[in-house]
Amino acid sequence: MSSKFMQTVKLMSVAAALTFGAVSTAQAAEVLRVGTEATYAPFEFMGDDGKEIGYDIDIVKAIGEIEGFEVEIVNMGFDALIPSLLTSQIDAVIAAMTITPERAARVDFTAPYYNSGLSVLIRESDKDKYKTLADLKGATLCGQIGTTGAKKAEELSGGNSKSYNYESEVFNELKAGGCDGAVNDRPVNLYFLATSHAEDIVEMSEMITSEQYGIAVKKGNQELLDKLNAGLKKIHENGTFAKIHAKWFKVAE
Ligand code: ARG
């Protein structure tokens, strides 16, 4: 047999192995549908290519890689996330979602993966008017629909809050004077201040609550919960978690 022929046969079998290998792994890898609301930078937002990027997206993909599943991100309104989980339209939620007792009664959360809290942004010109959180009573405060920030906005303002679907609308309203203060997760407020060049916006120095984020799954889906927790633990141990943290927050964990 000519060596040329043998070479061709070899190449053909390599190609076949590659093709079949690729097909079978693609079929074998489980796809996890992960819901998020991608206007919440730096946790989840749209990249220039129209795909979801951010801290949470990297975390869930890293967990997927180590636990052997593919991640499909499903973007929707924040208030639609838990209902979609309850009706099995998605398998998990990663959305800077605070573990609260109300939510924990409806869904199961992984171990906390991020320590957060709320803060209030106001216009610089109002900084003498709103010195403490108590001064915000009667002011118009805004937040994103269904979030802990929106709830706090309602409380602090004394029932004078507005909520919006997209985080960008919350910031725009504050800039335009549609509300006097925006209540959001502090890292999101700080990211906005650092990236938006909104020089007339400042953060009030008084912080509010301390909160922790978890990944949510349908109540009773212990198998997936165990996998996510195991993956989280592994990415902490192998340094991936710290790398992702440094990438989005510019400091090591
Ligand atoms: N941590 C807050 C909450 O759980 C806000 C989360 C908003 N997340 C988002 N992806 N828009 O209520």
Image: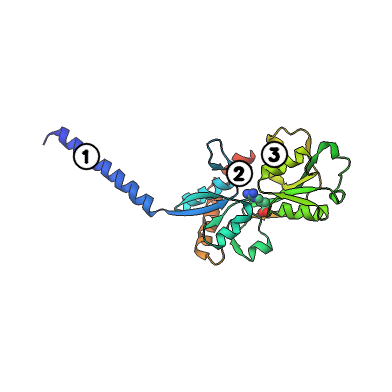
- Would residue 52 be found to the left or right of residue 144 on screen? left
Residue 203 x %, y %? 78, 41
Callout in the foreground (1, 3): 3
Residue 239 visible (yes or no): no
Q: Earlier in the sequence, mark 3 or mark 2?
A: 3
Q: Which residue is mark 1?
A: 10
- The local crowd at label 3, few if under 14, some if 14 to 19, many if 20 or more residues have their Cα within 10 Å, is some
The front one of 101 and 114 is: 101
Q: Which residue is mark 3?
A: 192
Mark 2 secondary-structure assignment = helix
Q: Which residue is mark 2?
A: 245
Mark 1 secondary-structure assignment = helix
- Would residue 185 be found to the left or right of residue 69 on screen? right
The front one of 236 and 112 is: 112
- Would residue 206 be found to the left or right of residue 49 on screen? right
* Amino acid type, mark 2: His
* Residue at the image point whose x is 55% and y is 58% from the top: 229
* Amino acid type, mark 1: Lys
Residue 125 x %, y %? 84, 36
Q: CA distance from mark 3 to mark 2?
A: 17 Å
* Residue at the image point whose x is 52% and y is 64% from the top: 221
